[in-house]
Amino acid sequence: MNLRIRRDSVSKSKNSKCRENVNSVKSKRYSDECVCDVVKRIVEVQDEVGGNGCSSGCDRSIHQLLSRGNQMGPANTTVPFILYCGGTCEPFIGSGVFQAPRGDNGSFFGCVETPIFRAKNFVKGSDCCVRLELLVPVTEECDPPECKMDTVSKVCPFFPADYPITDFQATGICITVDLKHFLAITCLDPITPIPANEFQPVADHDHKKY
């Protein structure tokens, strides 16, 4: 009974360390620091807008987040991203368990899975250990799509063509990861996710939905 949980491009930092050949064993430490630096910058700019040079990718997304959408304040609060595991280059799929009420005054435990994350903050005293919140892709009706894992991609099933994804739901479910274990990062356009207090899954026999 699992709840399976927009445009992207892999970013490379301007820092010379990020320009090293990440396919070389000798360059692994540089690619590690590249991912750490990008996520750290994302956290910094999200904090600047209160949401707690490449021409595309993460540099562009960071710039867009800093650019105010109007005179009243920033248009968005979050740079969502995908991480790619070192060694396999596979997208990292995060998962977490939640507890929610049922209609019979009881409760149930459910599971969410998603490749999309929001950086919350770094662990005190660490440059690469960061808390990530799971962001769930949802349709216009705020439902997560039915994922069919019958493709080579691990990300595309979360974005099915017949159920267009229009938003992201914050879950309040966080995981702590060591960014040194990731080889690359992909940033999506800045967003303001649906607040975590609106993450209200309900039991529905064979599956869960919001």
Image: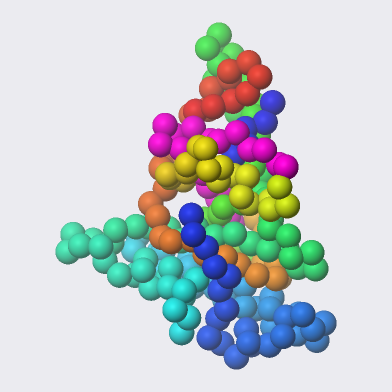
Relative depth, front residue between 52 and 84? 84
> Which part of the image, by quadrant, shows the N terminus?
top right
Could you tell me which residue is drawn at 53 percent across and 86 percent down?
Answer: 14
Is 28 on the left or on the right of 197, as rendered? right
Residue 55 drawn at (x, y percent)? 44, 79
Relative depth, front residue between 72 and 189? 189
Could you tell me which residue is drawn at 72 percent across and 80 percent down?
Answer: 22
Q: Residue furthest left?
A: 71
Residue 190 drawn at (x, y percent)? 41, 60
Is 89 on the left or on the right of 168, as rendered? right
Q: Magenta: predominant secondary structure element?
A: loop
Residue 175 visible (yes or no): no
Q: Is 134 within the magenta?
A: yes
Is 152 on the left or on the right of 194, as rendered? right
Question: In this picture, is 201 found above or below 126?
Answer: above
Span colored in magenta? 131-150
Residue 192 visible (yes or no): yes
Residue 27 drawn at (x, y percent)? 75, 85
Could you tell me which residue is drawn at 53 percent across and 43 percent down?
Answer: 161
Question: In this picture, is 91 found above or below 30?
Answer: above
Question: In this picture, is 176 found above or below 109?
Answer: below
Could you tell me which residue is drawn at 56 percent across and 42 percent down?
Answer: 160
Q: Residue furthest front?
A: 162
Residue 88 drawn at (x, y percent)? 79, 64
Q: Is 93 within the magenta?
A: no
Give the mark count: 0
